[in-house]
Structure formats: C-alpha cells, structure tokens
Amino acid sequence: VLAHDAQVATAGITTVLDALRVGMDDDADMNSADMRKLADAIEDSVQQDRLRADHFIHLRCEVSAPDCLAAFAHFDGDDRIKLASLMDHAPGQRQFVDLETYAYYYQRKLKLTDREFQQFCEKRMAESATNSGSNRAFIAAACHQRGIVLASHDDATTGHVDEAIEQGVRVAEFPTTKEAAKASKGAGLGVLMGAPNVMRGASHSGNVSARTLAGEGLLDILSSDYIPFSLIQSAFFLGDVVGGISLPQAVAMVSKNPAEAVGLADRGVIEQGRRADLVRVRLDDHVPVVRTVWRQGRRVA
C-alpha cells in the first residue's frame, strides 16, 4: 500500500480510488478475503496518516463469478467505497464479443492448449448465463441504498447502455464502441476511458480508441487504469494532439470531472472553498515532469 501510494503521489495524483476485485475465478491467485485484507490495510494507513494521497475504494464487481455476492458482502458498511463497476469478462460479452480477440488475449496469457481454452470458455460462459443478471441487479440495488456511484463496464451496444440507465448507472467505464459511448453521452452518463489508451492510441484489447472519442466530444473522464503517470501525461498530450480540446479541458478530465462523477464536491477545481490539492508541473520536451505535489495545502511529494 505504501509503495502504491508513493507512486500515485509522485505521478501528481492527490485522490485515488483503489480498485479491488469482487468475485474471483476459481483459478485466481487471490480470493475475496484477500481483497478485504487489502482494503483493511488501505484504511488503516488512512487512519494512521501514513499516506500521501487521499485513498478511497473502487469495487470492480465481476458479476459472472459464483462468489460475487459473498465477496461483495465483505464490504458491507465500508464508507470509503465511492464507486462500484458492474463487469462481465466472460467470452462473448462486452469487452470480448469477438471470441478471436478473447483467445488472443487469454489463451496466450494463460498458456492454454486449444482444448483447455475451449473448456475455460465454456465454463465462464455458463457462469455468466447463471450469475450475471441476478448479481448485477442485487449489487445495483445495494449501491443505490448505500449511496455508492455505479459504473457500467465495457458497454458495447445501445442495449447495454439502456440496461445501465435502467440500473441507475452514472459512469460509462470503458465503452468498447463509439456507438455505446455516443449513447452513454446522450443519456448524461460520464464517459470514462483509460489514459494508457490515449497514450497508446488504441485499446490494449482492440476496442475503440480513447483519442477517437475525445476528438468527437465523447470523452469526459480519464482513469489511470494500470499506469498512474498516464493521467497527467494524457492530459497534456490530449491538449496537444486532439483538435478542439484545450489544455484546461483535458486537465478537467483528470480532476474536475472525475471528482464530480463520484460526488467529491470539495476538490477537482482550484477555487476558494475547495481543498488545496495542487500539482506543479514542468514540461520537458512535451513530457510533464511533476515537481511538487500538495494535498490540502501540505506538501506530500
């Protein structure tokens, strides 16, 4: 937790939603109890004032997993949870509608033979058919009751977006097609994409480019996803390379817009009455170099 916090802060991030998975594959290296232990370590570090950044929790709920609801129950009453994503990574679903893309991503990653991969897919598709609908509905209702913001995940069609709207989703996390992003934007959802996607110029799993969405006015929020430094890097990059997006607009995608999306009204903008969360940056040959970071007026990096 301390190493993660140091990396986040020195990348210029003053508020972070730590993403923890809810619902595991049976061959995963970790289980739901491990996720609770990690959350406890984060929250203990917050209480002991060990951390540079302000840490909250983002639950990534794998609704196809048989243990999803049992894992979700580990977080009952946890008031540091600000966001929950409803995810289904089964083959043939959302991010992986194309089974060929799924095979390229998972068969290589897990080093499976063709027969092993076929069994892997059949099992996960069966779990999705059995669990996803009821788990999605239960978690959506629980989050509304507890005031946790909901995000859909990897929406690919207008039907997916309609379902998200019906379940009270406020953030469209990583729509995989322009069609889904446009429908989400039109419905008033905050469209969120990964900053690494911006820097790569493409999704790592072959879906729509965040640059394309930004250029068409369909991008509201950037997340660091798997590279903390990509947030500040992408903000300066978008302002340089995408027509119609100014630097202030790009910076809002990593500050004002995400803060508003998860209900953190005390930060995200430099103005009187807000928290003094500030980052001093120097551009060095188009690379933003973080020089100083303050959280609530206190220097943390």
Image (tube, rainbow, N blue to C red):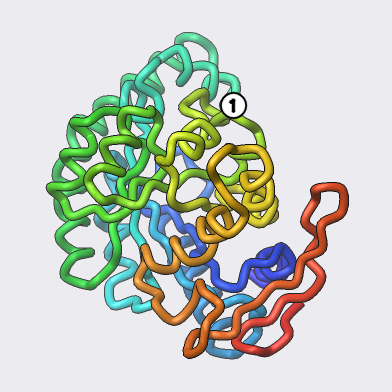
Question: Tag 1: residue type?
Answer: Lys
Quarter the N terminus occupies: bottom right
Residue 24 drawn above or below residue 142? above
Q: In the current view of this chain or complex, which residue is farthest to the front?
A: 244
**Foreground pick, 75 / 239:** 239
Question: Which residue: 36% across, 23% down?
Answer: 91
Residue 231 drawn at (x, y percent):
62, 54
Residue 77's x, y, as percent? 28, 77
Q: Identify the residue at the far top of this view.
A: 114
- Determine the residue positioned at 61% across, 76% down: 53
Indicate left or right for 138 with 157 as reference.
left
Q: Residue 2, relative to residue 124: is it above or below?
A: below
Asked where in the image residue 211 lies, by quadrant, the reply is top right
- Give the labeled residue for mark 1: 109
Q: In screen coordinates, is 162 left or right of 240? A: left
Q: Nearer the viewer, residue 91 or 117?
A: 91
- On the rendered structure, is 2 left or right of 244? right
Please state which of residues 225 and 138 is positioned toward the viewer in this rendering. 225
Q: Position of residue 68 (x, y in %)?
A: 29, 50
Residue occupying the point 26% across, 28% down: 157
